[in-house]
Image (cartoon, rainbow, N blue to C red):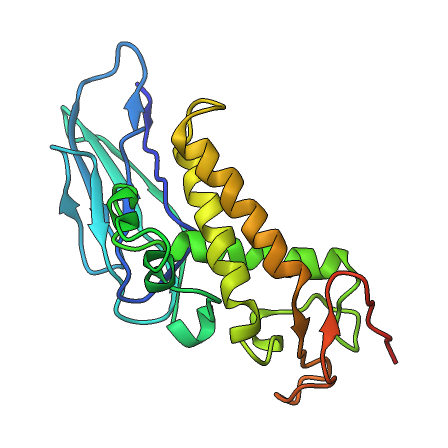
Amino acid sequence: MAIFPSIKVESTVQIADKTRIDGSHSFVSTGSPAILTVEIDPDGSGYVDVTANMYLDWSYSSAGAKAPKVKVTVVGRAFEEITGSITAVTAATDNLLSTDEDLQNHEPDILKWIREGRNSFKDMHRRAQELILDTLYRLGYTDNQNNRLTAADVIDKLEVREWSTFLTLHIIFYGLSNAVDDVFAKKASQYLKEAEMRRDSKSLKLDLDGDGEATNEGYDLPTISVTRR
């Protein structure tokens, strides 16, 4: 007999944001007793029976490391558990560069495309943030210690707000596309071009020494590199 619990979670989620703890890929080996129950404990507060749908939608109220668990029990009461890992962060720590309201300024009905298990596009804004910071790193932008920049190092968020907004829209529609010439693919291509235009027109004020203030008067993207001391 072998029981194989499975847990799928987001690695990072903002507090008060909806997230899904998914145990639906749990299974037992051939010849094992049938699954009796699947339960999920989101934060150490106790197990919830989710046998009917195999997942639990949840929202964390405090920041910190979370260790959600999935427990699979078979007929005869034998069980196995597996633990996942989620980091819950505050909005200030997450420091996203755009919002769902920014998306709605261009696509009023965009929220209908939020994926199951979520109630916002914060995950997509976070991905756009990661890509923007990676782009800055590849262009030679680091702090004075040669470390990658963080969102906190971008002093004036308005400078990158549109860049992040259009990049997030690109990510969303690219994910929805299932054919090269469908409407989602066209929107994804359009918004990527808009994002690149906003990127190339920006002059960023960056905090390179960690004092919370701009170290420079503005670095033009993408051609000027940072002089490190």
Instruction: Please report the residue visible at 51 percent of the width from the left and 42 percent of the height from the top.
Output: 190
Query: Which is more toward the observer, 35 or 90?
Result: 90
Q: Left of 58 or right of it: where is 164? A: right
Q: Left of 54 or right of it: where is 101? A: right
Query: Which is more toward the observer, 140 or 73?
Result: 140
Is 171 drawn above or below residue 18 in the view shown? Answer: above
Say which quarter of the image contains residue 214: bottom right
Instruction: Please report the residue visible at 46 percent of the width from the left and 73 percent of the height from the top.
Output: 93
Query: Which is more toward the observer, 99 or 85?
Result: 99
Is 83 drawn above or below residue 185 in the view shown? Answer: below
Q: Left of 31 or right of it: where is 203? A: right
Instruction: Please report the residue visible at 73 percent of the width from the left and 85 percent of the height from the top.
Output: 217
Instruction: Please report the residue visible at 79 percent of the width from the left and 75 percent of the height from the top.
Output: 145
- On the image, the x and y values in percent for residue 194 come to 55, 52
Point out the image quarter for the N terminus.
top left
The residue lying furthest to the top in this view is 31
- On the image, the x and y values in percent for residue 146 come to 79, 70
- On the image, the x and y values in percent for residue 76 come to 14, 25
Q: Left of 40 or right of it: where is 181? A: right
Numbered circles on residues, count: 0
Is 95 drawn above or below residue 3 in the view shown? Answer: below
- On the image, the x and y values in percent for residue 172 come to 42, 44
Query: Which is more toward the observer, 122 or 218?
Result: 218
Say which quarter of the image contains residue 182: top left
Say which quarter of the image contains residue 113: top left
Point out the image quarter for the C terminus.
bottom right
